[in-house]
């Protein structure tokens, strides 16, 4: 279906969609279903109780969690005794019983090639799914120094081995990974690197296209590294994510408003667009935070969102009022327990024959066009606090606890269905590290 403009084109497209076999369902979607707030169901899927604290414990913080297919790969971080975790890979099977795979595996670090290198244990690093594997970059070792000289590591689940995907130490340019480092897949061949600095900004926004062929001739190959946008950047990469070749950053300079910074990555000479949104009692919005999760998700039919989950307060401050017993002021919680969603532009209308009807038609774009045509708001670029619902089946792991409460410094990723988030571990408001896993389903 061609891209629509307005007027007769919209009417014709609407008639075409509504004349299909699911006419009633789509009509209801167009005319009745609001786009926000979303319903969120928190379900605890696993709890780790450590009899003895050690570096292999899954009670940890400042680690990464990366989902590849139906498995979660947990790597690095700091364990409950404040030591840097080992370089073992922890694997949690999200589909127990499928293909007779175990629910949990601990995989020691093994090089792909004989006498090859393996990554050091690290914390405050970055990771993402890439080439059916897990890419790890940056972070600090137990000495507080950079874990390596700028190696981009690849863990391959099929062989359970590690290899160097790219080395900035040998292949340049010279980069200095910090704790403000993020990495995202741009497509099946490229990665996006964000490297922050101590002045609350980003010094490097670059595309890395590593050579995946051992037979490739480096002398004749194009440069794998391309700087996309020169500094300065609007803010640090602590609240950053990528969706549909667009980079999103969130910052805040005062308690009553925050900023969403948007950068398209698929155009030359791309420039930042900044949208300010309120964060006050009159017009609620998510307050500034870090060490939480900012992730893209979809609820189907072409409707896209960013989910802003939990996290720590940027500047904890004591309450100005005193309790009735006139003791010292009770400080505000150091972490957030709320979850917000931002509605993004809807996906295009072009159907794809290989997808289901729900994913192919993407009527959200048409719904927004109809609303705009009649002067109604589509909801794009609006924030909303999610409605937390009680899960239908609590399960053994979730018995007695329906919400994780205030939490930060956990690992999180979007699950295979595109609408659920899995997060693991982190620190609770009292500063204690925890070792449980939660699934947040949004719909």
Image (cartoon, grey):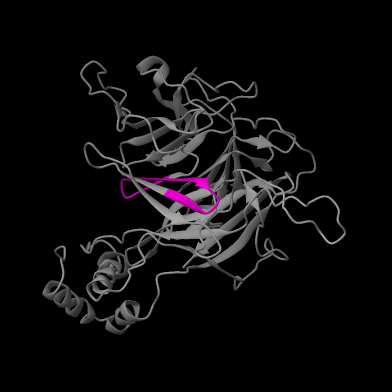
Residue drawn at x 37%, y 81% as measured from the top left: 32
Q: Where residue 385 sits: x, y (%)? A: 52, 64
In the rendered image of this protein, does residue 167 appear above or below residue 156? above
Question: For this view, does 293 lie left or right of residue 367?
Answer: right
Residue drawn at x 69%, y 43% as measured from the top left: 59
Q: Does the segment drawn in magenta span residue 248?
A: yes
The answer to whether residue 69 of the structure is visible from this angle is no
Q: Quadrant of the N terminus?
A: bottom left
Residue drawn at x 20%, y 82% as measured from the top left: 19
Residue drawn at x 40%, y 42% as measured from the top left: 132
Q: Find the magenta span and give its range.
A: 241-259
Say which of 366 and 147 sits in front: 366
Question: For this view, does 66 lie left or right of residue 84?
Answer: left
Question: For this view, does 190 lie left or right of residue 69?
Answer: left
In the rendered image of this protein, does residue 69 appear above or below residue 196? below
Say which of 318 and 201 sits in front: 318
Q: Where residue 318 sits: x, y (%)? A: 72, 48
Residue projecting furthest to the bottom: 24
Say which of 107 and 403 sits in front: 403
Q: Where residue 294 sits: x, y (%)? A: 48, 49
């Amino acid at each position: 279906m061609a891209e629509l403009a307005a007027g007769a084109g919209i009417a014709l497209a609407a008639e075409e969609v509504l004349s299909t076999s699911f006419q009633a369902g789509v009509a209801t979607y167009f005319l009745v279903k609001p786009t926000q707030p979303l319903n969120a169901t928190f379900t605890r899927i696993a709890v780790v109780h450590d009899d003895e604290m050690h570096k292999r414990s899954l009670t940890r913080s400042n680690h990464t969690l990366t989902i590849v297919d139906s498995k979660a790969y947990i790597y690095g971080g700091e364990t409950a005794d404040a030591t840097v975790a080992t370089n073992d890979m922890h694997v949690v099977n999200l589909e127990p019983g499928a293909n007779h795979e175990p629910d949990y595996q601990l995989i020691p670090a093994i090089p792909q090639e004989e006498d090859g290198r393996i990554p050091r244990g690290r914390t405050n690093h970055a990771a993402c799914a890439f080439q059916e594997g897990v890419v790890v970059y940056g972070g600090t070792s137990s000495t507080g120094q950079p874990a390596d000289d700028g190696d981009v590591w690849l863990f391959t689940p099929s062989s359970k081995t590690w290899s160097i995907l790219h080395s900035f130490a040998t292949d340049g340019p010279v980069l200095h990974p910090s704790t403000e480092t993020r990495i995202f897949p741009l497509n099946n061949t490229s990665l996006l690197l964000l490297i922050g600095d101590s002045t609350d900004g980003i010094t490097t926004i670059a595309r890395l296209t590593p050579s995946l062929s051992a037979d490739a001739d480096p002398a004749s190959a194009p440069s794998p590294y391309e700087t996309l946008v020169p500094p300065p950047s609007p803010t640090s990469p602590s609240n950053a994510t990528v969706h549909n070749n667009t980079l999103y950053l969130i910052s805040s300079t005062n308690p009553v408003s925050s900023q969403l910074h948007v950068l398209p990555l698929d155009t030359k000479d791309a420039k930042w667009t900044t949208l300010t949104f309120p964060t006050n009692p009159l017009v609620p919005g998510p307050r500034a935070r870090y060490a939480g999760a900012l992730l893209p998700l979809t609820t189907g039919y072409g409707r896209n969102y960013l989910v802003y989950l939990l996290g720590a307060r940027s500047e904890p401050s004591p309450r100005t009022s005193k309790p009735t017993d006139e003791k010292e002021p009770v400080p505000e919680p150091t972490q957030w327990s709320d979850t917000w969603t931002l509605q993004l532009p809807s996906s295009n209308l072009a159907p794809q024959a290989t997808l289901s009807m729900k994913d192919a038609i993407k009527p959200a774009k048409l719904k927004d066009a109809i609303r705009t045509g009649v002067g109604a708001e589509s909801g794009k670029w609006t924030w909303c606090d999610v409605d937390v619902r009680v899960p239908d089946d609590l399960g053994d792991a979730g018995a007695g606890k329906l919400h994780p409460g205030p939490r930060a410094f956990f690992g999180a990723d979007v699950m295979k269905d595109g609408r659920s988030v899995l997060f693991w571990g982190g620190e609770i408001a009292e500063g204690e590290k925890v070792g449980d896993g939660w699934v947040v389903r949004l719909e």
